[in-house]
Image (cartoon, rainbow, N blue to C red):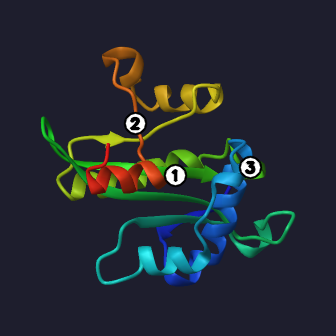
Amino acid sequence: MGFIIRAATLEDCKDISRMILELAEYEKVSDQVKITQRDLEQDGFSKNPFFHGIIAEVPEDLKSKEGHTKVGYALYFYTYSSWKGRAVYMEDLYVMPEFRGKGIGKALMSKVSQLGLAAGCTQLNFTVLDWNKSSLDFYLKQGCWDVTSDLGYHCMRCEGVALEHLAQGDL
C-alpha cells in the first residue's frame, strides 16, 4: 500500500482533531476529549510548540470510505529522564481501522524514533491501555517493554481542582 509519513502542518489540525476523537472513541473515553482544532493549532504550531506531529497520508485513489487521505498520526514531545537524559514521549499513535495491518503504524512509530534519535534521545516512552492486547503485542514486537510490569512504575496524574489546590499549596 502506498503512503507517506510527513511532518504535520497547521492545515492538518482538522484531520488530527478528527482522528483524536476516533482514538478516544476506540479507547472508550470520548467524553474526556476537551481540546479543539484551534487548541491544536495554537499548541502545536506556535513559536514554542507543546507538541510535534507527523501524518500518514495515502494517495487520493486509496482514500478512506469517508473520503479521507490523512489516515494516521502520531503526536510526540521531548522530555527528560533524570537517569538517562533526553527522551521522546509519544502521546498518540493512531491509524484508522481500515488502514491497520499495512505498516502505517510501524512507519509512524519508526519516524518518531528517528526524530528522537536525531535529537539525542535515548528512549521512547508512551502508554497503552492494559486491555488493548493488539497494541501491546504490536509494541512488544517492536522491541518495547512494559515498564509497569518490569519496574513497577505507575503513570500518575493530577488535574482539575486537585491540580489547582496542589499549585496553591492547599493539599
Dot 3 alpha-carbon crowd within 10 angstroms: few under 14, some 14 to 19, many 20 or more = some
Residue at point 69% right, 59% down?
Answer: 21
Residue at point 75% right, 75% down?
Answer: 60
| Front-lying residue, 158 or 115 | 158
> Would you name the residue on which mark 1 appears?
92
- Mark 3 or mark 1, which has the lower sequence index? 3
| Front-lying residue, 93 or 111 | 93
The single residue placed furthest to the front in the displayed view is: 170
Dot 2 alpha-carbon crowd within 10 angstroms: few under 14, some 14 to 19, many 20 or more = few
Report the amino acid beneath label 2: Met
The percent coordinates of residue 138 (x first, y second) are 55, 31
Give the label on residue 156, or none. 2
Give the label on residue 146, or none. none
> Would you name the residue on which mark 3 appears?
25
Residue at point 74% right, 49% down?
Answer: 25
| Front-lying residue, 71 or 36 | 36
Rendered view: 18 above or below 142? below
Can the viewer see residue 26?
yes
Can the viewer see residue 113?
no
